Amino acid sequence: MRTHTASSSVRSHQQGVALFVALIAMVLLSLAGIALVRSVDTTSSVATNIAFRQGSIGPVNQAIEQAIDRLFRSKTIASQNTNNPALGYFAILQPGEKPNGVPDVLAGDYTAMTAKYAAAGLPAASVDGTTKMEVRAVIERVCSGVGPGPWPVTIGNCDTLPPKVSDAGTDNRLGGGLPLPPIPNFRVTVRVDLPNSNTVSHAQAFVR
């Protein structure tokens, strides 16, 4: 009887150890499963962001081309010395610019941004019919602390580049070129949003 009792005790002890090992294995498998799910979610998020960035290139280019048209081609922005928020134009750099160079009206989360954008009197966002991306753009003349005066007054406070002209005059002699005023630089900032998500893309271009 003693031998039988000892054998039963050993088997019972072994069953307890096996249960403990099985529980540890289940915990490790659960942690591995959670890590795998998180890895898949991260990969999916990165792939979505890359796809969104690639998809936003077209709308960004279109917004920049529209800004160039308003400034230089159709010249719907009649005066470069005064603000025209209805066409997304400001004659000076706007206050509250973020460290990354994004104007305040295009910064922040979607709700805050749309409120600031509308309050500034800027035009409604253009919406892509297929992707539903919302595109907003702001054109700023790269000037600071300037008033509404004419160019001879304000040009000194602007970031400018000399115009590209020939060194020769109409008689082909060097030094005979006509002096031309410097040309201001303009900064176009574009924001692309995918509604009902946290996906945002910013882009900037300098034109003159």
Image (tube, rainbow, N blue to C red):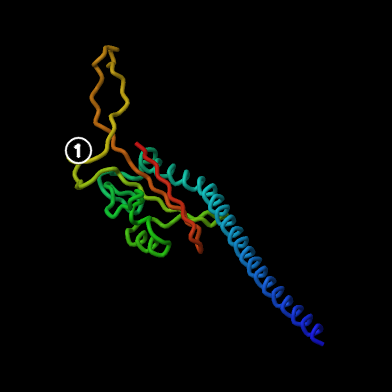
Residue at 33 percent across and 58 percent down: it is: 121
Rendered location of residue 14, percent (x, y): 73, 75
Residue 170, above or below 120: above
Residue at 72 percent across and 73 percent down: it is: 18
Residue 16, above or below 158: below
Rendered location of residue 117, percent (x, y): 36, 59
Residue 164, above or below 57: above
Position of residue 29 in the picture relative to residue 185 (left or right): right
Front residue of this view, candidates 80 and 53: 53
Name the residue tied to disc 1: 156
Q: Residues within 10 Å of mark 1 (few under 14, many from 20)?
A: few
Instruction: Give the quarter of the figure containing the C terminus.
Output: top left
Position of residue 61 in the picture relative to residue 152 (left or right): right
Residue at 67 percent across and 70 percent down: it is: 26
Position of residue 184 in the picture relative to residue 197 (left or right): left
Front residue of this view, candidates 96 and 6: 6
Rendered location of residue 7, percent (x, y): 79, 80
Front residue of this view, candidates 196 and 29: 29
Front residue of this view, candidates 72 and 95: 95
The outermost residue toward the bottom is: 1
Position of residue 42 in the picture relative to residue 150 (left or right): right
Instruction: Give the quarter of the figure containing the N terminus.
Output: bottom right
Residue at 47 percent across and 43 percent down: it is: 61
- Residue type, mark 1 in image: Gly
Q: Secondary structure at mark 1?
A: helix
Rendered location of residue 146, percent (x, y): 20, 46
The image shows a total of numbered marks equal to 1
Q: Quadrant of residue 34?
A: bottom right
